[in-house]
Every structure is written in C-alpha cells, then in structure tokens.
Amino acid sequence: MYSSSIFNPAAIINSLGYAISLFPLPILASSDGYCRNNQQKPTVSVKNGTYEGIFSPGYHQDFFLGIPYAKKPQRFSPPQPLDEGWDTIRPATSYPPHCFGYGSFNIGYNMSEDCLYLNIIRPHGLAQDAKLPVAFYIHGGGLVGRLLSHFLPLAKRLSEQRTNSTQYQGGSADKRFNLSFIVEQSVQMKKPIIGVSLNYRLGAWGFLGSKEALDAGATNIGFRDQRMALHWVNENIHAFGGSPDKVTIWGGSSGAESVTAQVLAHNGAYPPIYFGV
C-alpha cells in the first residue's frame, strides 16, 4: 500500500534516499557550464559522441531525450552494449518510442521493438564537475505496460499550468511520469538532483518464460535492459554533471519490484553500479 506522502513532491525527494540530502550543494549556473544563455542548446559529450538537448524555460532545465543505452535489440535476446562512435552532434530532442506492452494504458503512444532509450533531466546551467546525485527511475505497469497511477494527479495539475508537453514533462512522453517537477522541487529545496528515466522491454518481449529461453540464457530480458541502462549511466552520467557514485534507483509498483531484482541480481557478486535504493 502506498503512503499518502508519495503524492507530495518534497516527500518523494526526501524518500529518494536520505543519503541524497547528505551531499553538499554544488555551484549551479557557472560561467563554465554547458549553457551560457537560454537560446543556446545544451550539448554533452559522452563516450560514444556528442548529443544536443533541449532547454526548457518552463522549468529552467535541460532535457536530453531518446538517448540509446544499448544497440538496437534483437527479439528475445539480451541487450548488447552500444559500441559505435560518431564525430557529429546527434540530436537528443524528442521522446523515444515506448516498448511494446499490453493494456489500454498503452493506447495512443508510439511503440516499437527499437525502444532501448533513456531520458536525462538536469537543472539548467549545470557545470560538468557538479557531481549531483542521480535519481534513476524505473516505471511500473506490472512488467507488461507503463502504469503509475499515483503520479497522475501531479501530471493533471501541471497540464493545466503548462501546455507545452516538452516544457513540463521531461521524464517521459507518458505524462504520468513526471521527473521535471521532481527535479524542479529538488532545486527549490536546495538539494538538486538529476533525473533519469528509461524504457525496458515488457511482456513477452521482456519476460518470456520457457525452457528454450532458459537454455538460451535469455530470461528476464527486461531486467537485463534495466541493468544495461544502469551501466550506461555509471559510465556517462558525469558528462551531464552527475556523480556515478551517487545513483539512487527507485520506482513504483513493478518498478519497485525491478529495484528489488537489481539489488538481488547475481547475488550481489558484482561491483555496485548504484549508490542507494
């Protein structure tokens, strides 16, 4: 059962990890940051190449949308690391397609099997060496769709105030997943964070159970997608002004189940790629 406090953005930020509040506030809006004015589009160089994002004046945030964290997936196969590089600047300015799922809550969204992308929301004017804590959000929906009803009231309220979807909803094309508002609240509370949301494969595409899948080492593919995204964040989030040592993973419903799966993965035998849950 969800606590009523989960409707309160301040409570969400505090419960994201008490540890987040233990870190000092880095300097924002540095003259050496990525963006020197509101008209300049933010750019970030990661291991593979450079991305250009969007500046949101409504939240005074930078959005980097639709960044691939793995190769284009092969059906019923585990994700593979993105090992290509490029010299040009690639746009990260539009939401990626959703992964295929079941249920009416998927109606109206662009869906594709090519869906292994993540979105990054950060305060505007952030210096690369800011080393902000990172909130890595895993959406719920029973592992078959995208559903998080307890964020819906926030999205409804925001939709009345801001009509441009890319202005008030940086976390996902699904307006129920609101990372922009939470990142904004974190800045107002003087505990700024960077928000990350991701797509992962759902239903039969991500959690097919069979002897054949087991023999092929292709079970729990959706959890493997999440793990691959965590590895990508661990390797690249510093370029956005985040700290790979301060990544908190969180989620609601089956997103919380996913967090548990990541905590228990490999019996904890591998080095951690997140800080808290």
Image: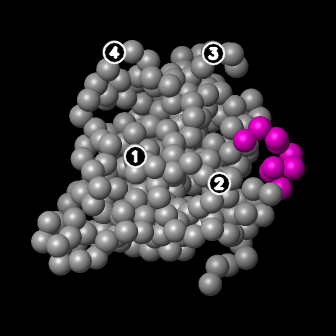
Of pointers 1 and 3, the one earlier in the residue sequence: 3
Residues tagged 1 and 3 counted as in contact (Cβ below 8 A):
no
Amino acid carrying label 4: it is Asp
Q: What residue sits 76% from the left and 59% below the top?
A: 154
Residue type pointed to by label 1 = Asp
- Magenta residue check for 252: no
Q: Is residue 70 above or below residue 210?
A: above
Disc on the earlier residue, 2 or 1: 2
Q: Disc 2 and disc 3: Cα gap in Å?
A: 32 Å
Pointer 2 with pointer 1, Cβ within 8 A: no
Q: Which residue sits furthest bottom?
A: 1
Nearer the N terminus, badge 1 or badge 4? 4
Q: CA distance from mark 1 to mark 4?
A: 23 Å
Magenta span? 157-165
Q: Nearer the viewer, mark 2 or mark 3?
A: 2
Q: Earlier in the sequence, mark 3 or mark 4?
A: 3
Disc number lying in front (3 or 4): 4
Q: Which residue does the numbered mark 4 point to in the structure image?
A: 87
In whole angstroms, how far apart are the C-alphas of marks 3 and 4? 20 Å
Q: CA distance from mark 1 to mark 3?
A: 30 Å
Residue 125, position in %: x, y? 61, 26
Crowd around label 3: few <14 · some 14–19 · many ≥20 (10 Å): few
Based on the displayed image, in which of its 4 quarters is residue 8 positioned?
bottom right
> From the viewer's perspective, is the residue at label 1 or at label 3 nearer?
1
Is label 3 in a helix, a strand or a loop?
Answer: loop
Q: Which residue is mark 1?
A: 114
Of the residues under marks 2 and 3, which one precedes in the sequence? 3
The location of residue 253, given as percent across then percent down, is 54, 74
Q: Which kind of residue does numbered mark 2 sit on?
A: Gly
